[in-house]
Amino acid sequence: MDKLVLYALSFLYILRVLFGSEVKMAVQDPSYPAYVDSSVIVGQTSLFQKDIEKYGNIEYMRCVPENGFFPDLSTISHVDIIFFCSPNNPTGSATTRDQLIHLVQFAQDNGSIVLFDSAYSLYISDDSPRSIYEIPGAKEVAIETSSFSKYAGFTGVRLGWTVVLKELLFSDGFPVAKDFNRIVCTCFNGASNIAQAGGLACLSPEGLKAMVETIKFYKENTEIIVDTFKSLGFGYTFQAEAGLDVVTTPGSGFGPAGEGFVRVSAFGHRANIMEAAKRIKQLYK
């Protein structure tokens, strides 16, 4: 490993500066809105096309139940950067090992770099890869980022890490890690001592145990919500964010393929989850 950066920084902003405004990107559809929004802010996209609800110069990779939430890569034109999140936000779908092998091979064949977001990886309970670096060849085509936000409630603290390996090179052979490090050191002074101390505490034996327990609690919340949907005959995928008022997010807010879905969350107090489940049942029964 050539570089492990632990900062409270905007990963997406750094990447925009690193790769410039002339690159073409692909994103899962639906996906975390910041992937597209940050591209718009720095001028990597063309005009928004209202008729299809998409920005130009972005390849929207449709990931829906019909294709197992994994895109048909044979339909994707040449792209420089591929944003990929597993488990995905908002669908919660975890990419299988065979699918990730296919993605890495696609990147190798097309000279693309995969920006792999593993912010939810500790929620994986089957044998799906938790890191893209588990896949042979990924070191030469991927950057991985993650965060304490989903494991330890650090959302407001904005503490995370990015891994850029020495094997990842630009087309001229120059290491991507060197440019990444220069940009980070120029633009940021690093996370506060308090935030870093919190992150280190999370990585201690006691901290890791606490994070596992927190994830277990949220997954139990998910089971309550899923059971509620099942009892009403609703379809669902894994990631189930709902408050006391049962506020949901329209799926279209995550991309055109999210139309017809809503996103709810299990990240909440148990009493609120139970109340939300009760209200949903009362509303739809």
Image: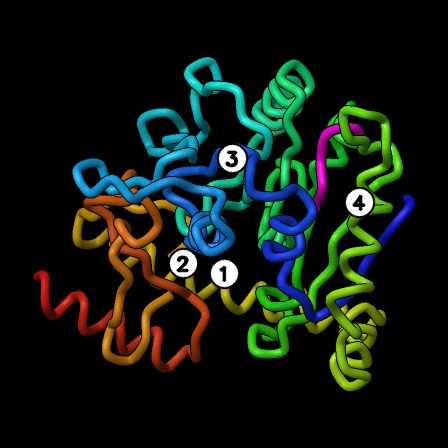
* Left or right for 120, reference 71: right
Q: What amino acid type should be assigned to the residue bearing mark 3? A: Met
Q: Magenta residues, as a range?
A: 140-144
Q: What amino acid type should be assigned to the residue bearing mark 2? A: Glu
Q: Name the residue under label 3.
A: 25
Q: Name the residue under label 2.
A: 223
Q: Name the residue under label 4.
A: 164
How far apart are the alpha carbons under marks 4 and 2?
36 Å
How far apart are the alpha carbons under marks 3 and 1?
33 Å
Q: Find out whether the residues at labels 3 and 1 contact each other: C-beta distance under 8 Å.
A: no
Q: Position of residue 138 (x, y in %)?
A: 75, 29
Q: What amino acid type should be assigned to the residue bearing mark 1? A: Lys
Q: Which of marks 4 and 3 is in front?
A: 3
Query: Relative to residue 99, is residue 156 depicted above or below?
Result: below
Q: Which of marks 4 and 2 is nearer the N terminus?
A: 4
Q: Find out whether the residues at labels 2 and 1 contact each other: C-beta distance under 8 Å.
A: yes
Q: Which of marks 1 and 4 is in front?
A: 4
Q: Position of residue 2 (x, y in %)?
A: 91, 45
Quarter of the figure that contains the C terminus: bottom left
Badge 3 marks a residue whose secondary structure is: strand
Residue at (49%, 43%) from the top-left corner?
44
* Left or right for 110, reference 275: right
The residue nearer to you, when weighing 128 against 25, is: 25
Q: Which of marks 1 and 4 is nearer the N terminus?
A: 4
Q: Name the residue under label 1.
A: 219
